[in-house]
Amino acid sequence: MMEKKEGIAVYIYRMQDKRDDKSQSPLFLSRAAARYAFGEGGEGSSKEASFRVEKGLRGKPYFPEYPWLHFSISHSGDFWACAMAAQEVGLDLQQHTKGRREHISKRFFHPLENEYLKKNNYRDFFDVWAAKESYVKFTGSGIGEDFGGFSAASEDGLAKEINGIQLRSIPFSPDYSLCLCAKEIQNVSLYYENA
């Protein structure tokens, strides 16, 4: 029997073949949902529960059979990540790659974020991107709707909240930025495994 849990769990799976991340995502999602709902070595398994996914009006995925169980998925580079909670969550993972950070920042980011990034030579570009994307995943608005209309950073650094919604960067790897977004971020557990 599934029980409503407290806290937020973040599951990170190293993908065997990152070119095939779309076909691995349902497997990883079912595995993460079962681990969150039933616990490690719990009474249940993913076979006992249907983790069918549907999309809401704005395209945000959810489990119709378990409306209390919220999740957010991200994948980048070699990793697939998912946050599970009994509250709305947003999660984003960004691999640090080379590219035109200044150009992308000027095109998509808020002026406060651009000032912050310019000041530190765009070193924290992926931290800002992950924070912004985790927030739009939380709201369900997606990056197409006014991505530059809010700021996840100021001259003082990364924001700890946007419009009363909390943000938390999660140390994961020096080559990746991982950010969690929720109304209340407490009791975060991080689980990692090779898939």
Image (cartoon, rainbow, N blue to C red):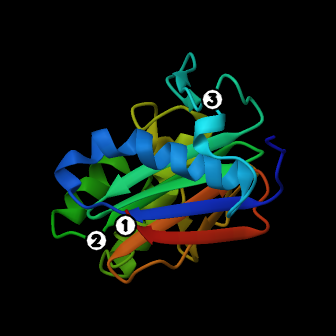
Disc 2 designates what residue?
96
Residue 100 quadrant: bottom left
State the SS at label 2.
loop
**What x and y, as percent, mark residue 46?**
59, 42
In the picture provided, is 42 more to the left or to the right than 118?
A: right
- Cα–Cα span, label 2 and label 3: 31 Å
* Residue for point 28% across, 71% down: 96
The front one of 47 and 31 is: 47
* Residue for point 33% across, 79% down: 123
State the SS at label 3.
loop
Residue type (three-letter) at the residue carrying disc 2: His
**What x and y, as percent, mark residue 62?**
60, 30
Numbered mark located on residue 78 in the image: none
Disc 1 designates what residue?
126
Residue type (three-letter) at the residue carrying disc 1: Phe
Disc 3 designates what residue?
63
Residue type (three-letter) at the residue carrying disc 3: Phe
- Cα–Cα span, label 1 and label 3: 29 Å
Does the residue at mark 2 contact the one at mark 1 (Cβ under 8 Å)? yes
Q: Is residue 103 above or below residue 20?
A: below
Q: Nearer the viewer, mark 2 or mark 1?
A: 2
Pointer 1 or 3: first along the chain: 3
Q: Nearer the viewer, mark 1 or mark 3?
A: 3
- Cα–Cα span, label 2 and label 1: 6 Å
In the picture provided, is 44 more to the left or to the right than 125?
A: right
The front one of 174 and 126 is: 174
Does the residue at mark 2 contact the one at mark 3 (Cβ under 8 Å)? no
**What x and y, as percent, mark residue 69?**
71, 39
* Residue for point 84% across, 45% down: 4
In the picture provided, is 16 more to the left or to the right than 93?
A: left
State the SS at label 1.
helix
